[in-house]
Amino acid sequence: MTERRAGYDSKSAIDPQDLANMLEAMKQIGLDISVPAVNEEARIGNVLYASGGCDPHDCSGFKPGSCSGVTCPTKSSACPTESCSTKVCANHTCQSVSCEKVSCNNYHHWESRASTHGALVEAMSSLPDGSWSQLSSRSLSAPDRAT
Amino acid sequence: MKISAYNCLTSSFVPGKHLAFNALTGAFLSLDDERLDDYATLLRSIDATGCPPDPVRPFQKTLIENGFVIPDECDEQAEISNRYHGGKAASRGLGLTIAPTITCNFGCSYCFQSHSNTRMDDERIDDLLTFVEARLEAGTSLSVTWFGGEPLGAFDVIEKLAPRLHALAVERDCTFGHSIITNGYLLTEPRAAFLASIPGFGDAQVTLDGARKHHDARRPTLAGNGTFDRILENLVAAARHIPILVRVNVDRRNIDGLEDLLDALIERGLRNVGVYLGHVWRYTDEVGATDLLTKEEFAAIETRFKFLKFRKGFAIGSSLPQPKRGALCSADSSNSFVLGPGGGIFNCWNEAHRDVHQAPGRYSPAAEPPPGDVKQQWAGYEPSAKPACRSCHVAPLCMTGCPWEAAKLNDRGDCISARFNLADQLRLYDLEQSIALAEKARQPPARPTEIV
C-alpha cells in the first residue's frame, strides 16, 4: 500500500455518504473519472478571471499579448540561479500570476460537461431524499471526515 | 534543493487518485498511486540528502519543474513580496467603484453601511468625468463597478455616466468593463437591457439570502415588506439580457435555507446563474444584528454548498486557486478609487457610505478641503509583516487577504477560506474538470475537415 506522507490531506467537509452516492451514480451512467490523465500536463495558473467569472465557452475577455510584466513563477526573480523573464501570453490575457501553459481548452468542453453533468444530476436525484446529508446549521459541529 | 513550503498533497473524491498543488506556482497535478510514490520518494530524498533520487523519474522532473521542490537559493517569501510590490508598480489600468447614491431602499439587519440621502448631481457627474479624464492612461483599461447604497436608486446617474465613460475609454484606446452590485429590487428588464447595451458589461451581482422565508426576514424593504418574489421576477427577466451572479450572505441564521434557494432558482429556470456565498462579517461598526460564522465554519459551509450546487445541477464554479500578484483590492491599489456621490474619494468599499468631509480625497474640485494624497494610508502596506502569514501554506494565494480587516489584526491577516478548505477546493475543481475530460474521452474523434 502506498505510504501516506505526513501532510497528506484526506479530510473533507463533505459527508462520505454523499460522495459514495455520487460515485454510485457515476457508475450507473458509466462515467469514470478515476483516470489521472486530468491536467496531466502541469498547469501553472488558470485562464479564469480571479473572480471565477470566465464564461464557459467564452474566452473573449482575453486579448493577445497582454501579459507583459508577469513574473514567471518557475523562473523566480527570487531565485538567483534562474533569470526572471517577462512572459507574453500567446493568446490570452492572464489576470493571474502567470502566463505559462494556460489554456482555454477545459472551458471549451463546457457543453459536453453540461450534458454529462445533467445525466449525473438525474442519476443522483433518483436516490431517495433521505440519502443525502442536509446543509444546516446543525451540521456546523460535525467534524471533518476522511474521504 | 529543498521542499517548497507551499505544497498541498491531498486525496481526490475518487479512490486511488490524488492531487498535488503548489500555492506559489499554482501548479496542479493529478496522481495515481505510482505517481504518489514518485512524489513521496522525491520529497524523502530531498529531505534526507538535499538532492533528487538518481535517476530522476519523469514525473519527479515534472514536480521539480513546477516548484514542488526548489533550489536552495530560492526565497519563496521574497518572491511573494516581489509579486505584491512588483505587481502594484506595474499596474496601469484605472479601476473605479462608483456609488451614484448612498440611499438604499432595503433595511438589512447586517448591513455595513449607514444610508444618507446623498445622490450624485450633474455637477458631481461632470467632476467625476474630469477626474477620469485626468487619470485614464491611453492603451490601458477602465473598469467600473456600480455600487451604493443601492445604485439603481439613482439609475439616471448610471444612464448619464456609463455611455460617457465608455466613450472616453474608446477614445483613449482602452478596454472598458462595467458591472453592478444591486439588491435587485429595481432591476427591471429595461434597466437590464440598458446595462447590456453599454459594451463591456460583466454581470449584475444580486443578493438573495435564501428562499422567501429566510430572505424576507433578512432583507426587507425599509417599510418591512418582503422582497424575494419581486427580485426573483426581476432576475428571470434580467437574465434574458445580462449575466446574473447571485450572492448569498450567510451567517448561522440562514444556512438552513440554502437548499431551498437553489430549488427556487431551478423552479424559475435560473439554474444557469452563478451562485456563491458571502461571509457576513463585522466589517464596520454599522453592522447590526447577526450571528457570525467563524472563518473555519464558513469554509466548511462553502465546501458543502458547492457540492450541493453540483448535486443540483449548477456549475460548482470552482476555479483553481490562483497565486496573487499586485494589489489585493481597491484599498491598497494605487489606481483604484471608490467615488462617493458627494465628491469624496475613498479607498475601501466599507467607506463608500461616509460623508464627503470624512473622505481622504476629493474628485470634486468644488468641494473643500482640496484633494490630499488619497492613497497615503495604504502606500506602505506590507503583507509579509504579519508573522502568522509567513508560515501559512496558502500565503501566496491571499497575501493577508482583505487589507481592511488585516489592518485590525496584529499578528495575522484576514484568513481566506482556502486556509481551511484548500483540499476540498482542489477536489471540487478536479471533479468538474474530470467530468469534462471523461466526456471528451467518450466522444468519437472529430473527423478531419473535408475540402470540397
Image (spheres, helix red, strand yellow):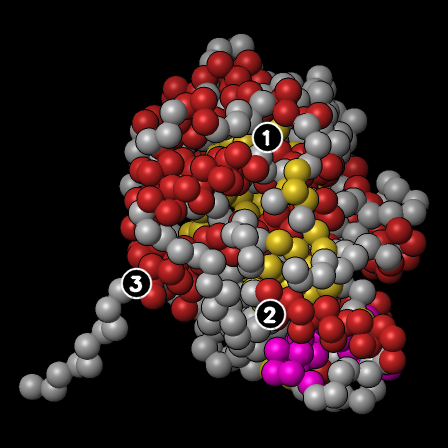
Chain letter of the residue beneath label 2 in the structure image? B
* First reached walking from the N terminus: tag 1 or tag 3: 1
Q: Secondary structure at mark 2?
A: helix
Residue stretch rendered in magenta on the structure: B56-76
Left or right relative to A33: residue B333: right
At 38% from the left and 25% from the top, the residue drawn is A128
Q: Pick the quarter of the image with the C terminus of chain A.
A: top right
Amino acid under disc 2: Glu
Can residue B235 be seen here? The reply is no
Circle on res. B442: 3
Nearest the eye: B98 or B123: B98
Amino acid under disc 1: Asn
Circle on res. B356: none
Does the residue at mark 1 contact the one at mark 2 (Cβ under 8 Å)? no
Q: Position of residue B86 (x, y in %)?
A: 75, 72
Chain letter of the residue beneath label 1 in the structure image? B
In this figure, which residue is indicated by the disc labeled 1? B249
* First reached walking from the N terminus: tag 3 or tag 2: 2
In this figure, which residue is indicated by the disc labeled 2? B34
